[in-house]
Each structure stands twice: as C-alpha cells, then as structure tokens.
Image: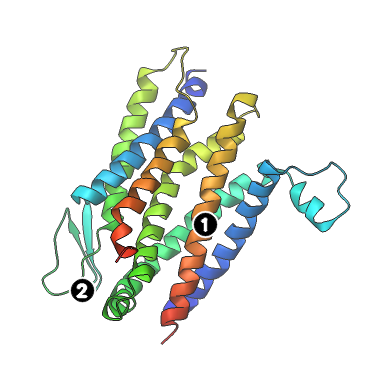
Amino acid sequence: MIVALLILHGLLAVALLGAITHQAISVWLPGPKAPSSFVGRMRAVLPMSYVNAVVALYLVTAILGGILYPSYRLSVRIVLEQLNLYMANGSFELKEHFVAVGLGMLPAYWYFWHQPLAQDRTRTRAVLTSILAFIVWWSFIVGHVLNNIRGFE
Amino acid sequence: MIATRSAPVFVTTFAVAYSILYVSAVEYNWALFTYHPAAEEFHFLVKPAKDAPAMYWYGWMATAGLAAFFIAATASWLSGGAAGRPWSGWSWVVPLTTMGVFCYLLSGFFIR
C-alpha cells in the first residue's frame, strides 16, 4: 500500500512539476504569438490556464506526502541518522518546511492569478509562481534522492 | 463589493500571518496536536513520545493555518469598505523571508 501511494505521490509530483514549470517559463519568457519551435510553443502557453491545476495538484500531492510521512519518519529518517547522512536529512527537513510555507501562499497565488491581469500585480504573480516552482523542484529532487538512498523494502 | 475589496486583504494577510506563525510554531513547538506514528495515535497539543519519534509537523501547520485564518478574516472584516489595500508583494516577501529563516535554522545539517 505504501509503495503504491509513493508511486502515486511521485506521478502527481511529475504532473505538478510540468504545470508549474510551464507556467513559470511562460511568465518570465513569454513566447511569440505564433510559435514555430518546440521551445517557442512551451513559452507561448497561457499561464492563467495552469492555476487551478497547480493548486489542485499541490494540495493532493502534499496530502499524499503527509500520509506517507509517518513511514518516512519511522523507517527512513532513523536510517539516515544512523548513517550520518546529515545533508540528506536536512534537505528533507527543508522540504517539509518549504512545502508548508507554499501551502500558505496558495490562496494568494490563486487569487492574484484570477484577478483581471492588472499591471500592478504582474510581479506578484510572477514571483509567487517562481517561489512555488522552486518549492516543487526542491521537493521533487529531494524526494527522488532520498528514495534512491533508501529505496523500497 | 465589500467582499471584492476584502479578498486581497484576506489572501495577503493570510500569506503573511501563516508564514510568521508557522516559523514561530516550529521554533517554539506550538503544535495544535501531536502524532505518534509508531502507536498511530493523535494527542492534543504537544506530547512527546516516551521511546519513539513524535511528529509535530501536522500540528504546526494546523496552528499556523487556523490562527492565520482568523487573523486574515479579522483584517479583511476591519478593512471592509476601506479604500486602501495592502501591497500584494507582502504575499511573497514574507514567505520568501521565512524560507530563508528555515535555511538559517537548519544550516547545522549542512555545515559540519
């Protein structure tokens, strides 16, 4: 059961990673209106269209992570401590706090993207998106590395 | 109309209050509840386990989330109808600063 949930958690994280990365790229590097290349099409997506998906995926992925967390606490973290893997342990500590901080930003992220795209909130939207993208990338990489360290039993 | 004016106050205040309360909850262990994973038991407020790990993370988020909700609701109620609204940038400045504080608090894991 835990393995199935872990795989589902990873798959949802991949979907979230794709959505928030597309949105962040289109915010900072908007593409041409008629893109011809792969990169151009990636830059030309409508950032607004990702907002609801990002919020939903962030919430579901975080909830699943919360369900899996006790297993990590009992069978992974103790091993990391015994092996003196301080950086891996600390990276996960940062992950849990970054994800929690990201949860508190979600209402603002959702609201400012759903407002008429007023010019005075352009930077707020861009930075909120970038911070969430950083949190998602950090969490994904740390989770992946820790899974490689401990793996399935 | 008031709800439309209050919404930016609510979301900005929530982001600011939640970030400050969450880092405070972690630092001073203000957990609304504790989870003992080995025994699979929840306990109200902070309750260390005797010979197994105790998890406070859920309780810290609950403390910060509930308190921030009431603070943000009060702020948006008080500002209802007022013309001014907070700078939207506070919704990312304070959380970003909080993330920096966590990097500092957890630096011991990386500098040995």
Q: Residues within 10 Å of mark 2 (few under 14, many from 20)?
A: few
Residue B93 to residue B40: above or below: above
Q: Is residue B34 visible?
A: yes
Q: Residue furthest bottom?
A: A153
Q: Secondary structure at mark 2?
A: loop
> Closer to the camera: disc 1 or disc 2?
1
Same chain for the residues under marks 1 and 2 in the image? no
Say what amino acid the circle numbered 1 marks. Answer: Val
Q: Secondary structure at mark 1?
A: helix
Query: Residue A74 location in percent, x, y?
Result: 28, 76
Q: Is residue A92 left or right of residue B54?
A: right
Q: Is residue A1 visible?
A: no
Q: Chain of mark 1?
A: A
Q: Say which residue appears at 85% left-offset and 55% top-offset.
A: A37
Q: Is mark 1 in CB contact (under 8 Å) with mark 2?
A: no
Query: Residue B10 location in percent, x, y?
Result: 42, 29
Say what amino acid the circle numbered 2 marks. Answer: Ala
Q: Chain of mark 2?
A: B
Q: Which residue is mark 1?
A: A136
Residue B59 to residue B40: above or below: above
Any mark on residue A108, and which? none
Query: Residue A54 location in percent, x, y?
Result: 58, 51
**Marks 1 and 2, how far apart at CA:** 31 Å
Q: Which residue is mark 2?
A: B39
Q: Say which residue appears at 49% left-offset and 31% top-offset.
A: B89
Q: Say which residue appears at 86% left-offset and 48% top-offset.
A: A35
Q: Residues within 10 Å of mark 1 (few under 14, many from 20)?
A: many
Q: Is residue B99 left or right of residue B37?
A: right
| Nearer to me, B25 or A9 | B25
Q: Say which residue appears at 59% left-offset and 59% top-offset.
A: A17
Residue A6 to residue B43: above or below: below
Q: Residue furthest front?
A: B112
